[in-house]
Image (cartoon, grey):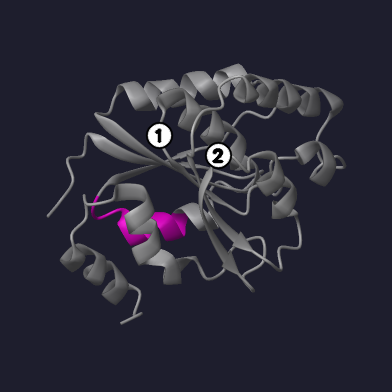
Amino acid sequence: MRYKMKNALIYFRGYNWLSQERSGTFDRIEKMFGHYIECIMIEQNVGDYLSTIEETKKVIESHDQVFLIASSMGCIPALYFGFELDTSVILINPGYFPEETLCKLLTVGEIDNLVRFKKVIEEKVQGEKINLLISEDDEVVNPYKFMVKYKDNIRFIDRNPTGGHTYENLETKVNLLNNLLFGSLMDDDDAGQVCEDWNFI
């Protein structure tokens, strides 16, 4: 089985504080699922949330169906489109409060922009859209503050005692990610093949 390439898995990247062209998390996601669906990374413009919305809309409009996943600060645009499109999102160690965790790295203007973006999101909140994968030893963000804020919108939580902010054990969650993202779109044989690719079975 292969997906139509008109479907896409959109990954919203966390804050790129090292200005790296590639994202390690995206590379891992693409290696897991890139044979089955087009994987696209969106790096949000921290100084202009409207440009992030426009860039993502272009991707959405050029595909029949999109699936949403994000890590760290990428949870902000992912939430916007989850509520906007009335679809579920996977958030990995969400960094929803960059005004606290990244205050030494972001400018005042960038923080103001992100705070405005979150106010727009909070006007769109609806339903249980959020699937959380969190590391309890996350050294960057406190996921529980996010969990309290969106307690009525969380449909699933997977807690891991280790993994850190980069969620080092992501590959062990391939079947969980498959079920949360695609539901019945990927059959058991495909999921098994992904596991074999990563030497987990």
Q: Residue 93, percent across and down?
A: 62, 54
SS label for mark 2: loop
- 172, 30: nearer the viewer: 172
Give, as a single range, the part of the protein colored magenta.
27-36
Residue at the spot of label 2: 153
Q: Residue 100, percent across and down?
A: 84, 42
Amino acid carrying mark 1 in the image: Thr
Q: Is residue 126 left or right of residue 182?
A: right
Farthest-out residue, front: 152
Magenta span: predominant SS is helix
Q: In the rendered view, would you say 169 is above or below 116?
A: below
Q: Is residue 198 left or right of residue 22?
A: left
Residue at the spot of label 1: 87
Q: Residue at x 30, y 53 (%)?
A: 34
Q: In the rendered view, would you say 105 is above or below 24?
A: above
Q: Is residue 185 left or right of residue 40?
A: left
> Depth-wise, is mark 1 or mark 2 nearer the camera?
2
Query: Looking at the rendering, in which quadrant would you find the C terminus?
Result: bottom left
Q: Which comes sooner in the sequence, label 1 or label 2?
A: 1
Q: Residue at x 36, y 60 (%)?
A: 31
SS label for mark 1: loop
